[in-house]
Amino acid sequence: MMQCLALLGVVAAVGGDVRAMRTASSQAVEAAAEHGWERTVWFAAATATLAYAALMRAETDDAERLTAAGLAFGVTSASPRLHFTLRAVHGAAAFDGGERAAGLAELQQARSAFGDLSAGPEQVVAMALLEFRAALMLGHIAAARTVLGWLAERSGDAGELHVMRAWVEASAGRHEQARFLVRHVLERPESTVLPQTMVDAWLLETSIAVAAGERPAARRALQAALALAEPLDALRPFAQAGAGIREMLVHQHGSFGASEAFVDRALAAGAGAAHSEATLSERELTVLRLLPSLLSLGEIADDLAVSVNTVKSHVRSIYAKLGVSSRRLAVLAAHEHGLLTDMHLV
């Protein structure tokens, strides 16, 4: 019985049926607890499925607890694919919980240990996206590109690759290039492997439109993201979204109709992420504290007695770590993280 329920959960997860997946996997875990079957690979499989779903709902503690339970008895040593998933999701949960460096390291170690073994497209795409986003959010562009290359060798022309490349371009402030890449996916949703990728794509389009001052376009893109995210219970993309998106959700609160309850949950998830430690260096913090001023980057460089290129490099890293694309949004995000105390938006 537990085997059947665990398999049903996996099949439902691949098909994007979140409710059926949670029901079947939860019943499998309950059956294991009732009959003492926790030392089986089927129990580990059910916990892996539930843990990934919890991660997507931004329920970090549950994701970490479930993955720890799945790894506890060492049964996954006979299933490298399952071990890869559990370790990667555990690392992502640690990252989301504020242990960012340790979380990224665990994600990288999980992929390295998995090596060149084969796995289904859904698994390799999902695990690669977890590691890629963690690396990019910490400003580790080279590490992010390594994951991108790893996935490209295994997934052909999956739409997720275009979204990942678009994220890289957006993090560097190259919004037109990012928009070109992400629209390839928006116009061809069938190219994606995971249903939640379209949520990420529309949120990226929202951020690009916000940065360009295109408020109506940003609103349309945000509504599209909400419509896709709600049935998937995909809150994590909003928790990781930039300050511009959170600002829109707050300022336009009450205007999202049937999606209003989901918006409340998305804001709560984003608030939790905002309290996680932003790992800025001391020099980046120094530059950050000058961003609310009216000083140009050249004037900031003069004030700090460094080159303007050095300041630009610090600013790019700050943007990447805070998940923003402009100076004003960096200041807003810094206040959400508690990194600035005086509210002077530029």
Image (spheres, rainbow, N blue to C red):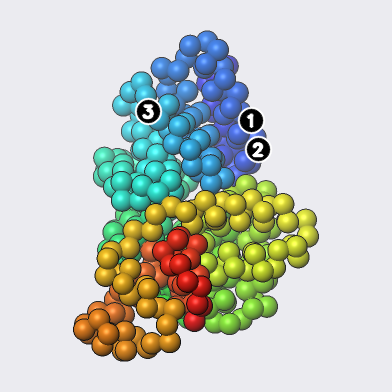
- The reply to whether discs 2 and 3 touch (Cβ–Cβ < 8 Å) is no
Quarter of the view holding residue 296: bottom left
Q: Is residue 231 above or below residue 187?
A: above
Q: How crowded is mark 1: few (under 14 residues within 10 Å), some or many (20 or more)?
A: some
Give the residue pinned by disc 2.
Answer: 19
Along the line of sight, which residue is nearer the eye, 192 or 196?
196
Along the line of sight, which residue is nearer the eye, 277 or 53?
277
Q: Which amino acid does label 2 sit on?
A: Arg
Q: How crowded is mark 3: few (under 14 residues within 10 Å), some or many (20 or more)?
A: many
Q: In this view, does 260 lie above or below 314?
A: above
> Picture coordinates of residue 159 (x, y %)?
49, 61
Q: What residue type is labelled 1?
A: Thr
Work out whether residue 286 can be spotted: yes
Residue at x-position 36% and y-position 33%: 83
Residue at x-position 49% and y-position 57%: 274
- CA distance separating discs 2 and 1: 6 Å
Residue at x-position 73% and y-position 56%: 260
Query: Furthest residue to the right?
Result: 257
> Picture coordinates of residue 328 (x, y %)?
49, 77
Q: In this view, does 303 lie above or below 119?
A: below
> Picture coordinates of residue 91 (x, y %)?
37, 43
Q: Which amino acid does label 3 sit on?
A: Leu
Give the residue pinned by disc 1.
Answer: 23
Tell me the SS state at disc 1: helix
Tell me the SS state at disc 3: helix
- The reply to whether discs 3 and 1 touch (Cβ–Cβ < 8 Å) is no
- CA distance separating discs 3 and 1: 21 Å
Query: Furthest residue to the front?
Result: 342
- CA distance separating discs 2 and 3: 24 Å
Give the residue pinned by disc 3.
Answer: 71
